Amino acid sequence: MVAELRRRGRRVNHKCVGRIMRQRGVVGLTRRRRRSLTKPDTVAAPVPDLIGRDFTAPAPGQRLVGDITYLPIQQGWLYLATVIDLHTREVIGHAMAEHMRAELVRDALDLALRRGLISDDAIFHTDRGSQYTSQRFRSALSGHGVRSSVGRTGSCFDNAVAESFFATLKTEIGTTVWATRDAARNDVFAYLGYYNHDRLHSTLNYRTPHEVRVGYRQSLALVA
């Protein structure tokens, strides 16, 4: 709150902002506990952990994380897969479907690739879900020169950035159960736009993911 007010040109003190928030009953939202969707494939070929809980990256497009979550709909479920850049924290790829087969995560990857936001020899880190360890998805990765990385089974900390994003989304989007899948899709599209272009991140020194990506490209242009 303080960072946003200062970006808008207001000279504020964090104690003053905290006092006003308490007086007006403004409080932060509590994140809901996420239900795990990870179903490991016990016969899949082993994949190393190339991230090792180091969720940093020297440049955009080099180190990515992905995951799947569910959105409750009155008529069933809608599944959301994302690709997040560890340098910018930007959601650079996503896909939604009524299923959670390997095509879902491949579509999210394809969107990030079409946008030109994945570098050569990038690392894509996920949990050990069968979608990510499937031959179809691993072939898609290798076909684009992307290296696969997975954490340990049952360890949310090994994919903490992706887990944290879904917790934030479900807390801030403000809908527990949607009436239709179309309504959920519209809300998610709107939230992703807000998250990438407007939401400030403490890990980014209170900048937006889009600002960090554009700023990196501008710094390269100045050096060149």
Image: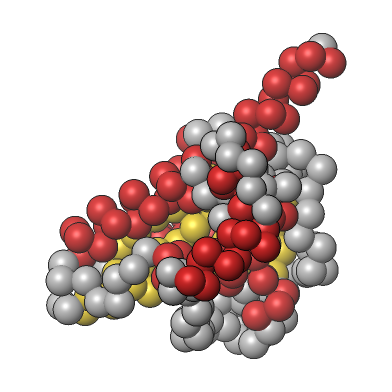
Q: Nearer the viewer, residue 198 or 154?
A: 198
> How is the protein colored in the picture?
secondary structure
The picture places residue 5, in percent across and down from the top left corner, at 56, 45
Q: Identify which residue is drawn at 57% across, 83% down.
A: 40
Q: Identify which residue is drawn at 42% across, 45% down.
A: 193
Q: Identify which residue is drawn at 66% across, 37% down.
A: 212
The picture places residue 68, in percent across and down from the top left corner, at 47, 69
Q: Identify which residue is drawn at 39% across, 53% down.
A: 191
Q: Is residue 136 above or below residue 24?
A: above
Left or right relative to 194: residue 134: right
Asked if one can make out residue 179 in the rendered structure from this viewpoint, the answer is yes
Asked if one can make out residue 108 in the rendered structure from this viewpoint, the answer is no
Quick one: quadrant of the N terminus? bottom right
Q: Nearer the viewer, residue 164 or 53?
A: 164
Q: Nearer the viewer, residue 92 or 39?
A: 92
| Quarter location, residue 88 | top right
| Quarter location, residue 97 | bottom left
